[in-house]
Image (cartoon, rainbow, N blue to C red):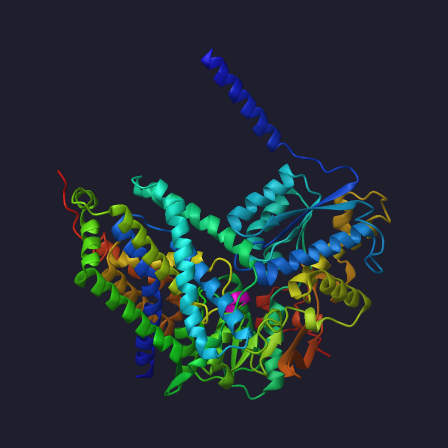
Amino acid sequence: MFTLTAILVDGTIYASWLFIVAAGLTLVYGVMRILNLAHGSLYAVGAYTAASAITWYLSAGHAPAGSYLVLLAAALAAGTVTGLLIERGVLRLMYGRDEVVMILVTYAVLLILEDVIKLIWGVESYSAYQPYQLLGRLQFGPMTFANYDLALIAVAAAVAIAMWWTLNRTRRGKLLLVVIHDREMSAALGIDVTRVFVVTFLIGGVLGAAAGALTAPVVSVVPGIGVEVIVLAFAVVVIGGLGSVQGALVGSLIVGIARAAAVHLLPEVELFVIYGVMCLVLAVRPAGLFARPAARKI
Amino acid sequence: MKGNKAMHIGLALGAVVAAAAAPVPAVAQDYKLGLVTFLSGGAAGPFGIPARNAGELIVDAINAGKVPAPYASKGIAGRTIQPVWVDEAGGPSKQVTEYRALVQKQGVDAVIGYISSGDCLALAPVTEELKKLTIFFDCGTPRVFEERPYTYLFRTGPTALMDSLGAARYILAQNPGVAKVNGINQNYAWGQDSWNDFIASLQKLKPGVQVGTSQMPKIFAGQYSAEISALQLQNAAFIHSSFWGGDMESFVQQGRARGLLDKQVAILTTGETAMFRIPEQIPEGTVIGGRGPYGVFAPDNALNKWFREQYFNRFNTWPTYPSYKMAQAILGLKAAAEKAMAKNPKPAEADVIAALEHLSFEAPSGTVKMAIGKGHQAVQEMVYGRFKLQGGKPAIVNVVRYPAECVNPPDGVTSEQWIKQGFPGAKCN
């Protein structure tokens, strides 16, 4: 009974974190057809910025409760600045190139930003644990859960609802869906596709940075943190179907629960299970669970 | 005409490539020393950079003749050390390529390096193939010299067996009634070997000790929510962990926040690197190791006093165990070269190798004995203690020192055999 509860709770917590990371990645792919490997760098920049900002804020003697606002502000600033730099500085010069070329371009950006991060923050680890511990913990039988982790589930749910609402219930969201469906036709109908690209990349960037910022109080922020996460996020969006937000949500849940089940029932296969699930899904649905059928253009 | 131009360009490029590929001999009086450590990636902060700092400090001091006795003479066998630094990041395949480049293109006289056990296992046969004096300074896997003998390869740091066996002896001394332990270690050679040696040693020393759960998350996972729940469901006296760097700090942060480490005592076999970084996060009573007599566990000798003072003055932080191990690798090479000078004033590589075999030399960590692996593998004492904040400052109490012969197998006996046989010949008093 405790084991089952632990699998569900731990799996959902992990899935929430994965979804926040993967949502931005899949949104950018859906709209721009760019598999943005530099999303890992946005995550890392968000984590480093939040860790530094929280440390600075608390060392100045401010109220600890305010650190959550600092965290959000850091995510917004890091995602906006880095996202703009990548989109305006590099990607806009490459639009229209083959998807494979764009993967290589974003991989190059990832490598460059890894070094930029080292230049700014060095190779030492950064720790900003206070917001994680401030919320306390919840006792459940022999187990305890950090309230911060439980709050992460609420944050992920809010992100999912906000994305669904924006895409399906607002005019701007519907314009975005039109661009996702057919970029050329959208441009022909007068939609400013370039502007949509900029806005989408910024939203994706902020989501990536927010995932990093929300993770900063939980982990020790170290070099390479962005490279580690992009592999997981990639597995999630591939399972869900590239470009599908609901696919990212379901993919995160599948990976999260599968990993938690492995940890509790068969720890030896924890490393294998994520990619095992990915292979299984791709064997049945090669384009992922929620991939849209591609319309044939004449 | 176009064909001629293309041919000329081709010849020119060929000449450039050939020139780049040709070995560059060191200036006759210089001793060209390849130094390899993590300069980027997750292992750079806790291990690579402290090791590089120590390397720079010791090389500069040796070249200036400012290391205290017995290392007061300048250079290695009178030759000024010319360091060539290489980043260890990138995995074993890349390191094999980098090593070949150091030996065949750079023409180094010797190589000192390698933190990752995976890199060491991949490089060991290559050192013999290229016939180049190589010293592993940090990697811990006992397998290197247990699987086959080497001529050109040495390791001046002890193996990881003594971390695991020392931890088992320590917790049995501290809590003789221990009945169950948990484990959380990284899922690669280091983590697997550490846990297997620890639990095998513990169960040999006290038959019947049970394993609650052994968690093996991916290296650099960072998030351990599910693992912590699994550990909480298996209430045990101790949690063994050979986590290092950011993974260790993340686990301590999360385990502390969830109350895990208040109920189960963590054994952090590399905890010494974190005790000054996150002292407020480490619960009092946590068992701390430092992979040998390094850092806070180092002996009170003149070399150590000099090393700590110089290191702090230059880098504004105290040296941790990777710093000590890099320092003693370079000092070991110098000691061997100078011993070889007794026979040959200008010792060749073979003379230095012969001198380094079975050598005992002094280091900031005390006496290092190249006692096993047919004289190619060092042994040292192992030290464990418990973390305590004294007046707000991190300190270690309940320190127990285990002699080298208590935690290392005799020469010719593998770690696995020694554990299975119940540690015959161990001298612990």
Residue furthest top as drawn = B1
Q: Residue at x 51, y 52 (%)?
A: A116
Residue nearest the viewer, comparing B40 with B408: B40
Q: Residue at x 30, y 84 (%)?
A: A1
Left or right placement of residue B343 versus residue B291 in this view = right
- Residue B11 magenta: no
Quadrant housing the C terminus of chain B: bottom right
Left or right placement of residue B104 versus residue A286 in this view = right
Position above or below: A260 against B15: below
Q: Residue at x 50, y 17 (%)?
A: B7
**Residue B323: where, in percent of width, then height?**
67, 61
**Residue B190: where, in percent of width, then height?**
53, 63
Residue furthest left as drawn = A298
Position above or below: A63 against B177: above
Examine the image and state in which quarter residue A255 appears. bottom left
Examine the image and state in which quarter residue B273 appears. bottom right
Residue nearest the viewer, comparing A66 with A225: A66
- Residue B246 magenta: yes
Q: Residue at x 54, y 68 (%)?
A: B194
Q: Main secondary structure of the magenta part?
A: helix
**Residue A56: where, in percent of width, then height?**
53, 69
Is residue B425 at all visible to an observer of this figure?
no
Is residue B286 at all visible to an observer of this figure?
yes
Residue nearest the viewer, comparing B52 with B25: B52
**Residue B53: where, in percent of width, then height?**
67, 57
Region rendered in magenta: B244-248
